[in-house]
Image: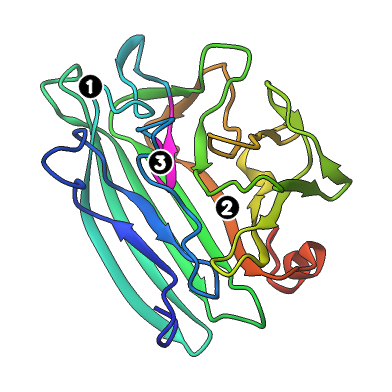
Amino acid sequence: MDGKRKVGFYQKEEAGIDQEKGRANYWHPLYLPDGTVLTEDRPADHLLHRGIFLAWHQVYVGNRPVGNTWILEDISIVVKKAEFQKIDKTKGQLETLSLWQSPLWENGKTFIEESTKYTFYTQKSNYNVIKMEITLNAMADTVYLGGSKDSKGYGGFSVRMKLPKDIKFFSSDGEVTPINDAVEAGQYMNIFGTLTDNNKQGGIMIYADPKNQKGPQTWILRKEGSMQNPVFPGRALTPIVKGKPVKLTYYLVPYVGTINPEQIIKDYRFSN
């Protein structure tokens, strides 16, 4: 909450006995500043999409596949901690600890500890800023993560949101046209359309910190029936070595009306 305004709901427990095992550790609903619900959970076209979530098709411990966090196959995510504290008048933080476990790895022993810090900034004008800092620690010698094995290579930080017919995508170079495969489009994507409950315009900016990976940031973008994804690491597997955690940082900026992405990035020092 930001005063009396709802910001978002973190799903700590599995969502229910009729849900897929491991369906936890995600955000839904996430709200626009006017109270409109922005995200979707279990949409009919992709029942495993779940608000703001983190998932990969390829998960290996050493050379052994141990499951698929995208379709929640053979992997459970157990949230052990979710603690919130107010930092000052301008922000608060939620810190979580989640354990990745699989029956295919040492009878369910934890192979990844995911520590995430969510920083929520007090609403400014018509938008608010959420910083998400994700740290993946390998409990086995080496864990590998990879996106889908097809040419799209999608995986990692994903946003399943409502997509009205007039949805548009903008980066620092102007409007972006989604294609089937990933597109190079800079560090942020501003997704804009008639999104509010009273049929007014709004959107969300997704920013991927350039320190997340080497090379240009690519994006999987969809105008209907799917999620939006700043791709990490792509189709090729990337290692997480024990004692050398992988850190990923993303910012979300839900808003009503319009925003100036470049100014917000500068004001909040996204790349610092």
* Residue 4 x, y percent position in the rendering: 40, 86
Q: Which mark is residue 250?
A: 2
The answer for how far apart the CA atoms under marks 3 and 1 are is 19 Å
* Residue reaching furthest to the right: 173
Q: Is residue 136 left or right of residue 226?
A: left
Cα distance, mark 2 to mark 3?
A: 14 Å
**Residue at point 10%, 21% (across, down):** 107
Quadrant where the N terminus sits is bottom left
- Give, as a three-letter code, the residue at label 2: Tyr
Q: Amino acid at mark 3?
A: Leu
Q: Which residues are magenta?
A: 49-56
Q: Position of residue 127 (x, y in %)?
A: 63, 73
Q: As drawn, which residue projects farthest toward the front?
A: 198
Q: Magenta stretch containing residue 157, yes or no?
A: no
Asked if the magenta segment contains residue 52, the reply would be: yes
User: Which quadrant holds the C terminus?
Assistant: bottom right
- Label disc, if present, on residue 136 of the rendered structure: 3
